[in-house]
Image: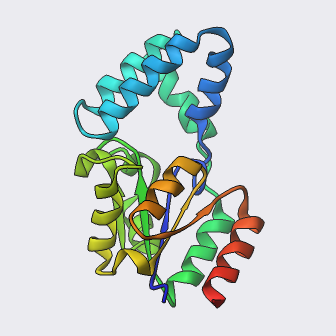
Amino acid sequence: MIRAIIFDCFGVIVDDALSAMNAELAAKDPDSVERIRALLYRANTGKIEAEESSAAIAEIFGLTYADYRKQLEKYEVKDQLLLDYILELRRTYKTALLSNIPNRSLLRRFTTKELDKYFETAVASGEIGYAKPEARAYEITADRLSVRLDECVFIDDREGYCEGARAVGMQSILYKGFDQFRTDLEALLEK
């Protein structure tokens, strides 16, 4: 029986501006994209501060730190339709946010009040020291919800992170868009 639904942030709830920027950069300079991935991993697991990572990434893009932050903020748009649906789901299921993001960076995208409104818990990889697809990231999230792994559905826009969830016993849905996700989730919940 499903008792909890866990959502990824970027590419699901919030548009993933950095992925779009990386895609453009990959055509010109693939090595830079790898440097960005390495910086993100270090920040997302709490090994370096978000500001240090962001400053280095801004430099790779040839932007000032302030311009880089503005670029992200401009394109990181929340999906209000999905957030409204999460409120509906929350009447019956526990909900959580699990994101590969540096410590305290969720509070740049959401207020504490918003996080409390939509989720029982919000887990930032930088806070816990484990990033998806590491098993501990999923396990910690389930523990914070007080549910077993097999009672969870995990939603992400990256198949590798969905596979990580399945490997620990969660069910998972690859997010391609709201309508597809809702159809897939409702079919799963009816089982």
Q: Quadrant of residue 179?
A: bottom right
Q: Position of residue 116 (x, y in %)?
A: 38, 71
Q: Position of residue 46 (x, y in %)?
A: 24, 39
Q: Which is nearer the eye, 2 or 18?
A: 2
Tell me if 117 is positioned left or right of 17 in this view.
Answer: left
Q: Which residue is found at the position 73% from the left and 58% from the top?
A: 177
| Colour scheme employed for the rendering of this structure | rainbow
Tell me if 42 is positioned left or right of 181 in this view.
Answer: left
Q: Is residue 63 above or below residue 70?
A: above
Q: Which is nearer the eye, 58 or 172?
A: 172
Q: Quadrant of residue 148?
A: bottom left
Asked whether the viewer can see residue 141, the reply is yes
Q: Position of residue 19 (x, y in %)?
A: 59, 33
Asked whether the viewer can see residue 61, the reply is no
Q: Is residue 176 above or below residue 62?
A: below
Q: Which residue is found at the position 32% from the left and 76% from the top?
A: 145
Q: Which residue is found at the position 62% from the left and 73% from the top?
A: 84
Tell me if 36 is positioned left or right of 43 in this view.
Answer: right
Tell me if 106 is positioned left or right of 158 in this view.
Answer: left
Q: Which residue is found at the position 48% from the left and 12% from the top?
A: 60
